[in-house]
Image (cartoon, grey):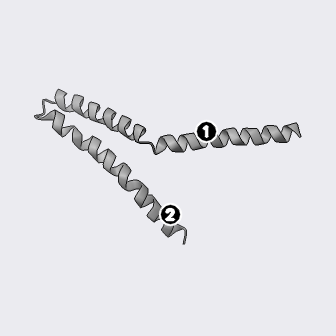
Amino acid sequence: MPALEDGVQAIEERNARVEADKAWEGSWYRRLLLASAMYATAVLFLWSSNAEAFWFQSLVPAGAYILSTLTLPWLKRRWVGKKGR
């Protein structure tokens, strides 16, 4: 029976890791971290290109990323609903 208990424990540990990964993927912390990195990269690129109002223009890719993360869960539910029929 110890082998069975070890197997169950291994499955429970794997499930905990999977749940943590799912929570990370959907977390606002991750979204804001990626949007901030995207904003900083755009600022550096536009600044090096001598673009005007680069601080403001850099909001476009970061904002688009945040917008996409808001719409994708809705679209995913719709897609899964149609596929499930």
Residue at left 82%, top 40%?
5
Quadrant of the image occupied by residue 50:
top left
- Disc 2 secondary structure class: helix
Question: Between residues 38 and 24, which one lies in front from this camera angle?
Answer: 24
Quadrant of image for the N terminus: top right
Q: Quadrant of the C terminus?
A: bottom right
Seen at 38% across and 41% down, the residue is 31
- Location of residue 46 in the rendering, given as x and y in whole percent from the top left corner: 19, 32
What is the crowding at mark 2: few (fewer than 14 residues within 10 Å), some, or many (at least 20)? few
Residue highlighted by disc 2:
80
Percent x, y of residue 7:
78, 40
Amino acid on which the number 2 mark rests in the picture: Val
Q: Earlier in the sequence, mark 1 or mark 2?
A: 1
Q: Residues within 10 Å of mark 1 (few under 14, many from 20)?
A: few
Q: Is residue 50 left or right of residue 13?
A: left
Give the alpha-carbon distance from disc 1 to disc 2, as whole Å. 24 Å
Identify the residue under disc 1: 17
The answer to whether marks 1 and 2 mark residues whose Cβ atoms lie closer than 8 Å is no
Q: Is residue 69 above or below residue 16?
A: below
Q: Seen in the image, is 61 located left or right of residue 80?
A: left
- Left or right of 18 in this view: 27: left
Q: How many marks?
A: 2
Type of amino acid at the residue the image marks with label 1: Arg
Lateral position of residue 28 relative to residue 17, left or right = left
Residue drawn at the location 27% of the way across and 44% of the way down:
63
**Residue at the extreme right of the image, as rendered:** 1
Q: Residue at x 56, y 40 (%)?
A: 20
The answer to which quarter of the image holds residue 45 is top left
Furthest-bottom residue in view?
85
Dot 1 falls on a residue whose secondary structure is helix
Nearer the observer: mark 1 or 2; the answer is: 1
